[in-house]
Image (cartoon, helix red, strand yellow):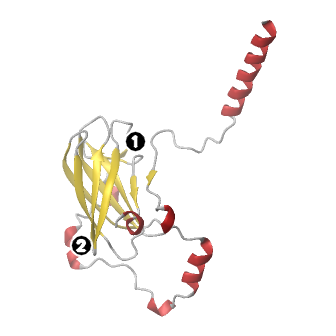
């Protein structure tokens, strides 16, 4: 019996030592949610490289500029004026679905947290994660409630990060990452 206790104690010490030596670069709170493409929609690296090599550089669109209509639809927010906070499981968004509507998409999300939210903050990013546009939508978002958001499908748009808003503060560690060309059909 004594040998078993010693063996269990040693095993526990080894497990604790292994856990403490893990990489500490992971975030303390929150989880980024990324909606991955369907299995049949994935492209391998060779086919993407072939597509990129076959593109003529003169055909590439110019720098992304918002049209007056897009600018009017987007309630632009100065990123420097946003109060960013870290939130917990109280403020969480869930993905329900996304429908492509040509130049816009309808994104359906759910408040899957445990607190009433004050809206959402949307950040539109290109493939280098540069901010193309952003908007803040304020509304009462009850727990378990679904909301439909209209996303502008801008040129060069790679992803849209949707953050919960609580007390006019953006929960920066709780993005719901949407990749429109994959998630919106």
Give the number of the disc on residue 86: 1
Residue 101, horizontal then vertical, whole percent: 26, 71
- Report which quarter residue 45 is drawn in: bottom right
- In the image, residue 93 above or below residue 99: above
Q: Give the residue at x 30% y 54%.
A: 121
Category of crowding for the residue at label 2, using alpha-carbon neighbours closer than 10 angstroms: few (below 14), some (14–19), many (at least 20): few
Q: In the drawing, does residue 185 fall left or right of residue 32?
A: left
- Cα distance in 3D space between marks 1 and 2: 29 Å
Residue 110, horizontal then vertical, whole percent: 28, 47
- In the image, residue 155 above or below residue 131: below
Judge by depth and name the residue closer to the eye, 91 or 79: 91
Q: Give the residue at x 42% y 68%.
A: 158
Q: In the drawing, does residue 92 fall left or right of residue 34?
A: left
Q: In the drawing, does residue 171 fall left or right of residue 53?
A: left
Q: Which image quarter holds the N terminus?
A: top right
Q: Give the residue at x 71% y 33%.
A: 18
Give the number of the disc on residue 71: 2
Category of crowding for the residue at label 1, using alpha-carbon neighbours closer than 10 angstroms: few (below 14), some (14–19), many (at least 20): some
- In the image, residue 63 above or below residue 104: below
Residue 7, horizontal then vertical, whole percent: 78, 17
**Residue reaching furthest to the right:** 3
Q: Which image quarter holds the C terminus?
A: bottom left
Instruction: Check disc 1 and report its element: helix, strand or loop.
Output: loop
**Residue reaching furthest to the top:** 1
Mark sitting earlier along the chain (1/2): 2
Q: How many marks?
A: 2
Q: Give the residue at x 46% y 65%.
A: 129
Residue 61, horizontal then vertical, whole percent: 41, 85
């Amino acid at each position: 019996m004594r040998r078993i206790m010693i063996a269990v104690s040693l095993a526990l010490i080894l497990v604790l030592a292994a856990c403490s030596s893990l990489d500490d670069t992971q975030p303390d709170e929150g989880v980024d949610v990324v909606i991955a493409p369907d299995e049949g929609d994935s492209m391998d690296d060779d086919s993407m490289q072939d597509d990129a090599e076959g593109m003529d550089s003169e055909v590439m669109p110019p720098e992304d500029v918002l049209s007056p209509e897009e600018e009017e639809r987007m309630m632009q927010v100065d990123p420097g004026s946003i109060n960013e906070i870290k939130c917990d499981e109280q403020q969480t968004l869930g993905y329900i679905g996304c429908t492509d509507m040509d130049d816009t998409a309808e994104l359906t999300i759910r408040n899957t947290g445990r607190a009433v939210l004050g809206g959402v903050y949307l950040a539109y990013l290109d493939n280098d994660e540069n901010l193309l546009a952003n908007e803040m939508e304020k509304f009462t978002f009850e727990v378990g409630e679904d909301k439909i958001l209209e996303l502008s499908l801008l040129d060069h748009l790679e992803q849209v990060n949707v953050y919960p808003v609580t007390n006019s503060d953006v929960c920066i560690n709780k993005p719901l990452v949407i990749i429109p060309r994959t998630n919106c059909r």
